[in-house]
Amino acid sequence: MHQSNRSLLDIDRDHLIHPVTSFRGHEARGATLLQSGKGMWLTDMDGREVLDAFAGLWCVNVGYGQDSIVEAAAEQMRRLPYATGYFHFGSEPAVKLAQRLVDLSPDGLDHVYFTLGGSDAVDSAIRYITHYYNAIGKPAKKQCIALERGYHGSSSTGAGLTALANFHRGFDLPLRWQHHIASPYPYRSDLEGDDAAIIARSVQELKDKVAQLGADNVAAFFCEPIQGSGGVIVPPVGWLKAMRQACDELDILLVADEVITAFGRTGPMFACEAEGVTPDLMTVAKGLTAGYVPMGAVLMSDKVYQGIANGAAPDVAIGHGATYSGHPVSAAVGLEVLRLYTEGGILANGQKVAVRFDAGLAGLADHPMVGDTRGRGLLGAIELVADKGGKTRFDPALKLADRLFAKGYENGVIFRAFADNIIGLAPALCASDAEMDEIFARIRKTLDDLLEEADIRAAL
Ligand code: PMP
């Protein structure tokens, strides 16, 4: 390690707070600084090259080092680095990106509000829903329902819809209007193998929860079409469609949080598309700009838009906004990223290499530590268990997730290692077949290496 790197690590420890990280844990472990990237590969501060099987944080869907994106950003910065959306101003890239999103997204989502990322997209959805029900004269409709193991960001309201314990612990969440129902988790369900029954149970739980809260009090059901941060939980095909129907029957809005699943991650441009579902609101981020610059969006149906519009006096501003909403540089990047997905062939490549990804997942099923593999498109998971028959998780005292991540890195592959020993995978859509095979070879080696360690072997 260079001397300069060592001092950077000290500065990091002393001054930089990392997201979703234990302060003390980070002080002890220190940072790994990433230096450069090209395609599927990252190079760290020590010159080590690693295959990124997680696209940064499920976002760099087009891979690193796409020069045309850099050029689009530079050109926009030179011409006009900033334009506010306030005072009826705007910019060409923001308008064009809104049009592209409306064209590409499920029919019926006609209006776009741009955010800086996913958390504020969810937060904006919550604020607009609140405003909508007040505007249409149903102010009691404020209760929101989401899924256990769901992730909807870490804003002060969205983190309560998120149902992961560390997002609630110490933050006085969830709020009193936030409720959760079980997630459709086939591997951990007593109904495993019976897709129709898993779907029917979810529908029933939603209906029961609405009945319990009072139909006139419930505003919306929030879900990820495939749950990401909860451990890549893939519901049976048809689940989202059934939930859409239930929301219609119950007269509540459906919010599809596609922050991870949008932009080809699960195969089609949007996961909703695969089920022929149009949500009332849809949140996106990550793949919208492929992580090159920050941006997210809320797509809104005409019903919600008109409700809000009709309820507000023409001369009174609706008080929701941000300095960087519709940022022209982010929008210019978004336009180029969308062009790469479509005309650039990256979406098609993702669909092609997904066959190899599927085969790679299936190929690990025989490993002694693997209880379940699952995925859709290029979003997948490998769930590790100490006992395949009983599906028993490894003892937390083994700290397997940390060891998995460290061993994977040593073997030159980055994946997500969730606390309950689920490996999350979300490689960029630009991967070649050979790179995909290499990812799985490195994961297998990582599992084999861990199996050599006495305490892990003994736990099996
Ligand atoms: N919703 C979902 C489904 C997400 O996966 C994420 C981020 N992982 C968010 C919202 C929050 O997005 P961000 O981290 O950009 O604020």
Image (spheres, rainbow, N blue to C red):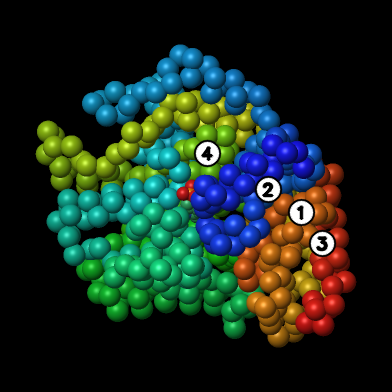
The reply, left or right, for residue 251 in relation to residue 234 is: left
Q: Which mark is residue 409?
A: 1
Query: Crowding near pointer 4: few (<14 within 10 Å), some, many (20+)?
Result: many
The residue located at (65%, 37%) in the rendering is 62
Does label 4 or label 2 sit earlier along the sequence? Answer: 2
Q: Label 4 is placed on what type of residue? A: Leu
Q: Indicate which disc, 1 or 2, sits on the residue closer to the N terminus.
A: 2
Residue 38 in the image, given as x and y percentages of width and height:
73, 34
Which residue does the image show at 82% across and 82% down from the upper left? 458
CA–CA distance in space, label 4 to label 3: 32 Å
User: Which is in the foreground here, disc 1 or disc 2?
Assistant: 2
Dot 4: what SS? helix
The location of residue 216, given as percent across then percent down, is 22, 68
Q: Are marks 3 and 2 in contact (CB under 8 Å)?
A: no
- Where does the image place residue 294, in percent across and percent down from the top left? 49, 37
- Residue that mark 4 sits on: 288
Residue 416's spot in the image, x, y percent?
Answer: 66, 57
Residue under circle 2? 32
From the viewer's perspective, is the residue at label 1 or at label 3 nearer? 1
- Vertical arrangement, residue 404 with respect to residue 2, above or below: below
Query: Does 242 sit left or right of 344 as displayed?
Result: left
Mark 1 / mark 3, whichever is N-terminal:
1
Residue named by callout 3: 446
